[in-house]
Image (cartoon, coloured by chain):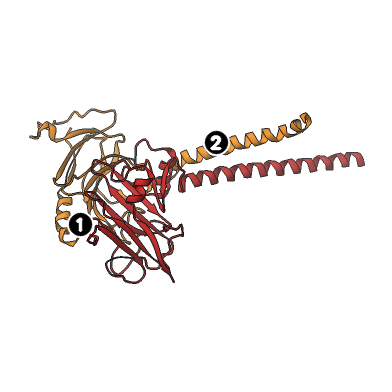
Chain colours: A orange, B red
Amino acid sequence: MKGLFRGLWPNARWAGAGLCAIGALHILETLATPYLLPAQAYNSLTAGAAVNTMTLLPPVSPTAQKVPFMSADASYAICPFDTQKGAVAVTASLPAPGWALALYSPEGENFYVAVAQPGRPTSVSLLLVAPDDRFTGLTPQAQGLSAKDAAQLKVPASQGFVLLKAPDQGQAYKRQSQATLQAARCSAQAQ
Amino acid sequence: MSFALHQFKKRLVYLTLSSAQTIAFCGAVLAAGSVSACYAVNTGTSLTTQKVGPWVTWLSAGQQGADPYTRAHYAALGALPLNSETAQLYTARTDSDGNRLHSSCDYAIEGRAIAYHWWSVSVFDDAGRLIANPADRFAFTSDTIGLRADGSFIVSLSRDARPDNWLPTGGAGRLAITFQVLDLGVRAVARDDDTVEKTLPTIRRISCK
């Protein structure tokens, strides 16, 4: 019996080494995937859109679908932001359920999202500030705004984008939705 | 001389065999590591996804502290989910009986409106592309769908035109259906399987051509 185990021992060592190697490769491949693949969604969504400016995206269709599984159940406006040279102010109105304002990092992390509440329009006013930075420009009061109007949001990445989603509520609401999307603002603040 | 040759041949055979073993071992390790990672990233496991009937959702989609599998899944897919704490996105690639969704078949998506929540049903091809169709119909939302008097709905998936809520599937081949619910402060779809099963629509195959 002892002899049998002694005979199996080298194989057991190989099996152990193999399992460890499989585990290491599995972990390495999983962890490396987000870094090896380019930020496809970020690149295709922000292509052609001016930085720190809200831009309306064309209606989602088979010929104008920027990312996989981007549904045609909504219209979108996008603002690629860059807080390296200063804070970025974002204001939008979310008039009805289904409306959402989301902030993404280039890696696709949705680190902030605001959705409309039923029965009352929701206004979103944010001041995006670079990570490990403090906004030293004009305060909201200096710009004639109430301090509570703009919530200061420290973003985890200095670059990223704001996505404003207007749900498809039917043909009758299309013009109103487009006007609300166009009224959304995204602009760099003076230092 | 012949003894030396014999020794050399023996050594050569040993080297060849041990090299073949090492190569086979490395190949097996590479294949097993890659296949297991691909499976965990593409399909998900019970730690990262919730599977209820035909529907699959990635539990920490879009979140900042998402697990590595979820991050890798969406990086590989190139899609942009909303934070799963705010919006629940369910994807189905099979019908409720487990058969692969295909454009050569007609399906009925049957469910009940989720009160006070915005939701949508969309159809895509297997890679997440919208399916071109003359009607320009790709999705129904809680605002645009035609509900029956009891609050239930049926969405017909078919190549040919159907009455009421029809989503054309053209000749797309394999299909994927998404069901998204936007949360308005309260989770519309709970995490426990029973509640999810009652809330999510069923996908019934009608016929195949």
Front-lying residue, B63 or B152: B152
**Residue at point 26% right, 28% down?**
A133
Residue B33, horizontal then vertical, whole percent: 56, 42
Residue A169, horizontal then vertical, whole percent: 20, 57
Is there any visible trace of residue A159 in the rendered image?
A: yes
Residue B123, horizontal then vertical, whole percent: 35, 59
Question: Is circle 2 on the same chain as circle 1?
Answer: yes
Q: Is residue A32 left or right of residue B201?
A: right
Image quadrant in which the N terminus of chain B is located: top right
Chain that bears disc 2 = A
Q: Assess disc 2: are there few (<14), some (14-19) or many (≥20) residues with their C-alpha within 10 Å of its C-alpha.
A: some
Q: Identify residue type, mark 2.
A: Ala
Q: Identify residue type, mark 1.
A: Gln
As drawn, B195 above or below A74: above
Is there any visible trace of residue A41 in the rendered image?
A: no
As drawn, A71 above or below B185: below
As drawn, B92 above or below A157: below
Front-lying residue, B169 or A152: B169
As drawn, A171 above or below B91: below
- Which residue carries the number 2 mark? A24
Task: Give the spatial CA distance, label 2 vs label 1.
Answer: 49 Å
Residue B204, horizontal then vertical, whole percent: 39, 61
Q: Is residue A10 left or right of residue B86?
A: right
Image quadrant in which the C terminus of chain B is located: bottom left
Front-lying residue, B63 or B188: B188
- Which residue carries the number 1 mark? A169
> Furthest-left residue in view?
A144
**Residue at point 50% right, 47% down?**
B39
Mark nearer the N terminus (2 vs 1): 2
Instruction: State the SS at label 2.
Output: helix
Q: Is residue B148 left or right of residue B168?
A: left
